[in-house]
Image: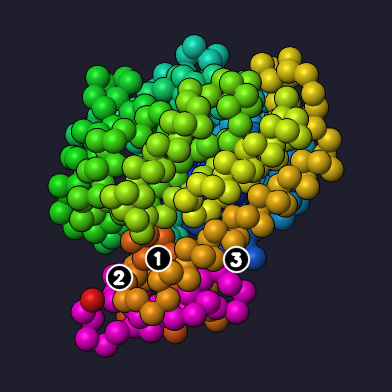
Amino acid sequence: MIDTNIFQDKTAVYYTLGCKLNFSETSTIGKVLREAGVRTARKGEKADICVVNTCSVTEVADKKCRQAIHKLVKQHPGAFVVVTGCYAQLKPETVAKIEGVDVVLGAEQKKDLLHYLGNLQKHETGEAYTSALKDIRSFAPSCSRGDRTRFFLKVQDGCDYYCSYCTIPFARGRSRNGSIASMVEQAQQAAVEGGKEIVLTGVNIGDFGRSTGENFFDLVKALDQVKGIERYRISSIEPNLLTDELIEYVSRSQRFMPHFHIPLQSGSDEVLKMMRRRYDTALFASKIKKIKEIMPNAFIGVDVIVGTRGETEEFFEQAYRFIEEMDMTQLHVFSYSERPGTQALHIDHIVTPEEKHARSQRLLTLSDEKTRAFYARFIGQKMPVLLERPKPGLPMHGFTPNYIRVEVPYDASLDNQVVPVLLGDFNEDGTALQGTVLIDRKI
């Protein structure tokens, strides 16, 4: 039994790196600590506990994790420092040796964080608690809002896809999930707490059901029936798991938004084979075509990696032309980073850092062109926007069903409200459309 008296009146700060799933899990950790009596430290206040949730998707991510830990240790002298997340699972001893770190928790341990805090007395050297890959089996539920309007519902964790460049299966373990019933219950609770939008998150969410004998499509249909939730977004789904049945269902649903995020990684079939991806460009193109045929206004975000081992100039040009021709809205571009223990290290032909940068810039420019053209199509139209409270001094912002970012003049009464907005021209930096809230509140 944990003596929570030691946590009364203690303060904590949280630092998260990486994906939406990490942010969701950090928010859940914060909730656990709050229920134990720990409050979030105010700005400028020295905290008693520091929690760092790390990422390890690239070498740069590892470096950012170390920098974040050093910064928090310096800002909060004497604080009890806990480090968890993917970098902690993959490199526990390295993290434990960082000055100021007390406890390192792996993928299986982070759900029981309270058990590892002891009496909050600093350790002379960091202690690492992790499990072997085969022993990472539990699914820790998480449905959290944090400081955002939307909730993030973790529906799945881990991955059984061992792509040649990726360490996520080693950091998060095998694919696993909670039950559909438990997901519905969490969504219902989010509605009770005032949630209007839920983003479904996970590592490979289309693989949902692996540990419960269910499937992702049935999960979508069950969540669609939850009263009070007005919007759902599917954060990222592998193209080979994005079924026509699911696409058609989203097109008919009032709650699942016409917004897809689909990892492509490369538009070259040769590179996809080297990556050990489970589809080719023909399958990917068929999914884009299917979406656009029945939802021409859908937003389609796409992940792309440049500069992987084996990506010759010819293969990159193939990929660029494929992406250029596809009716997608926005690219999330990542430069390949070599990860220890991955099969990609055995592939010949290394792309120089300079060439990686040049290829990234070309794709980012293409992405900007595609996104701007997509936004411009809707100028002058009326669309419902879920608005959220901005940082002080900034206009309110929110998103249309098809994920167009919109800015409107500040009005506190509109926070977390879906309101009809007349979409105007681009804002000053071109990142959003300026909108006018319609007084009659009718679309």
Q: Quadrant of residue 4?
A: top left
Quick one: SS at disc 1?
Answer: strand
Front residue (pair 113, 216): 216
Q: Nearer the viewer, mark 1 or mark 3?
A: 1
Disc nearer the start of the sequence (1/2): 2
* Residue 219, magenta (yes or no): no
The dot on residue 43 is 3
Answer few, some or many: residues within 10 Å of disc 3's Cα (few below 14, many 20 plus, some between 14 and 19): few
Residue where numbered disc 1 is placed: 399
Front residue (pair 95, 57): 57
Q: Is residue 117 left or right of residue 206?
A: right
Q: What residue sits 64% from the left and 65% below the top?
A: 44
Marks 2 and 3 sit apart, C-alpha to C-alpha, by: 34 Å
Marks 1 and 3 sit apart, C-alpha to C-alpha, by: 28 Å
Q: What residue sits 77% from the left and 41% below the top?
A: 356
Residue where numbered disc 2 is placed: 384
Where is residue 157 drawn, in percent x and y?
Answer: 42, 30
Where is residue 11 drawn, in percent x and y?
Answer: 54, 54
Three-letter code, disc 1:
Phe
